Image: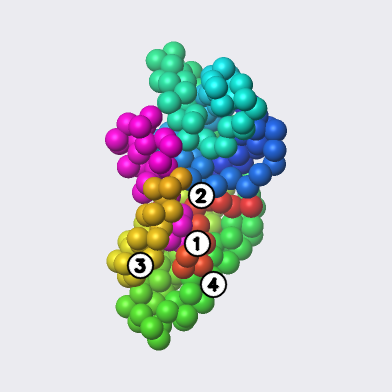
Amino acid sequence: MEGWNYFNYFTEVEEYFWKKRGAHLLVSPLDWAIMETWQKAGVPVSAVLKGIDRAFESYQRSRRGGAGRPLKSLAYCTDAVLEAAAEEKEAGVGAAPDEKRPAGTAEAFSRDELKNYVQKNAAQLLKAAERWQQDTPELGARIREVAKSLAGNTSLLDAPGGPDLEDMERRLTVCEEKLQAALTSYAKEELMLRLRREMDGQLAAYRGKMKGEQLAQIERQYLHKRLLEEFGLPRLSLFYFC
């Protein structure tokens, strides 16, 4: 994985899963939640790909795989991925993405590209704040506050030397956490129930195969992603920069 882009985690995993599945299909919200859980836990991309390989090999030996049914979700791969990650950690190889970045990663994006990305997201948040101002002024104010904080981070990109992407990522994560807290506080009960029913339906076949902590993390990431989608708000992390 030499030369792997620090902020290309999801693309690498997504494209590899497509390749193994043999179909270029949209990755489900559940799959994205699982990838985010691995990324936040520092699971190296090398361990994820190795785990996917093992999961597909196991699935092909199963009754469903033998009958020609496709493996549809990354949820089937979770145990194999975590097992591969534990092996790499024990062997001392496959450093996590935020621990072993290739030299020159800071130059992966230009200052203008980064500024445009942050400013575009801040503008989208301000539009959302205006939409919510009349019906739920408190939510509108919270979103506007996050937008202002987000836009303020662009000044860091004018500092001498290359941009500190790790520090920028930390700041964007704080903004997204504030945004998530606001959405969770003001989301209607009917919406939260619908999202949880949706989530439970997608997780039903895999709950018995996951550990409680792992399952809780996936649920949090799933609801995080879906709430942002429902409110029409962007992901702020540089991992979603394109």
Q: Position of residue 217 (x, y in %)?
A: 35, 42
3D distance between C-alphas at marks 1 and 2: 10 Å
Q: Outermost residue, bottom direction? A: 134
Label pair 2/4, CB-CB below 8 angstroms: no
Q: Position of residue 56 (x, y in %)?
A: 58, 24
3D distance between C-alphas at marks 4 and 3: 28 Å
Q: Is residue 216 magenta?
A: yes
Q: Is residue 237 above or below residue 146?
A: above
- Quadrant location, the N terminus: top right
- Please tell me which residue lies in front, 68 or 98: 68
Q: Which residue is mark 4?
A: 123
Circle 2: is it few (<14), some (14-19), or many (20+) Cα within 10 Å? Answer: some
Q: Which residues are magenta?
A: 203-229
* Quarter location, residue 140: bottom left
Q: Is residue 229 above or below residue 204?
A: below
Q: Which residue is mark 1?
A: 229
Q: Which residue is mark 3?
A: 190
Residue 239 lies left or right of residue 201; in this view the side is: right
3D distance between C-alphas at marks 4 and 1: 16 Å
3D distance between C-alphas at marks 2 and 4: 25 Å
Label pair 1/2, CB-CB below 8 angstroms: yes
Q: Which residue is mark 2?
A: 29
Q: Amino acid at mark 3?
A: Glu
- Residue at x 46% of width, y 68% of height: 231
Mark 4 secondary-structure assignment: helix
Q: Examine the rendering and report whether any part of residue 125 can be seen.
A: yes
Q: Position of residue 96 (x, y in %)?
A: 47, 30
* Quarter location, residue 227: bottom left
Label pair 3/1, CB-CB below 8 angstroms: no
Front: mark 4 or 1: 1
Mark 3 secondary-structure assignment: helix
